[in-house]
Image (cartoon, helix red, strand yellow):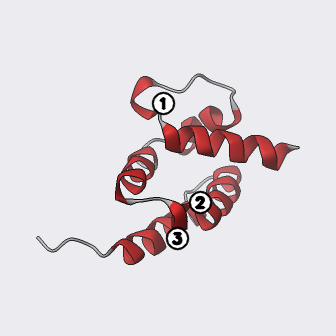
Amino acid sequence: MIEEPVEIRRKRLIHRSLYTGMKETDLLLGAFARKELPGLDSAGLALYEALLEEPDPAIYAWAIGREPVPAEHDNAVMALLRRFAADMAS
């Protein structure tokens, strides 16, 4: 299997972040992805991609602090997303 170039991966993840299916998540993740994904390495992109496999309402609830983040997503990328969400709210 041919590995996807990192720039193509970033563009794909940004697009996916803009069209999650839930408007609130689209707005949050779309803005986050545009700002933060260019600075993430392959490991960070893998963490973010794993997060996108979760249901939209759960991602949103974790990001805004409404629900605790499960252990498998309690990582540097989620911390970055939570800070981003807090900054958007203020």
Of callouts 2 and 3, the N-terminal one: 3
Q: Secondary structure at mark 1?
A: loop
- Residue position for label 2: 36
The local crowd at label 2, few if under 14, some if 14 to 19, many if 20 or more residues have their Cα within 10 Å, is some
The structure residue drawn at horizontal position 40% and vertical position 53%, both measured from the top left corner, is 49
User: Which image quarter is the C terminus in?
Assistant: top right
Q: Could you give the CA–CA distance between mark 2 and mark 1, rounded to whole angstroms?
A: 17 Å
* Label pair 2/1, CB-CB below 8 angstroms: no
On residue 33, the disc is none
- Residue position for label 3: 15
Residue 2 location, quadrant: bottom left
Is residue 60 in view from this perspective? no
Residue 8 location, quadrant: bottom left
Whether 46 is drawn above or below 71: the answer is below
Q: Nearer the viewer, residue 83 or 30?
A: 83
User: Which image quarter is the N terminus in?
Assistant: bottom left
The structure residue drawn at horizontal position 44% and vertical position 71%, both measured from the top left corner, is 12
Residue 81 location, quadrant: top right
Percent x, y of residue 9: 38, 70
Q: Nearer the viewer, residue 21 or 68?
A: 68
Of callouts 1 and 3, the N-terminal one: 3
Q: Secondary structure at mark 2?
A: helix
Q: Nearer the viewer, residue 13 or 19?
A: 13
Q: Could you give the CA–CA distance between mark 2 and mark 3, rounded to whole angstroms?
A: 13 Å
- Kind of residue indicated by mark 1: Asp
Q: Residue furthest right?
A: 90
- Residue position for label 1: 74
Percent x, y of residue 19: 56, 64
The structure residue drawn at horizontal position 45% and vertical position 69%, both measured from the top left corner, is 10
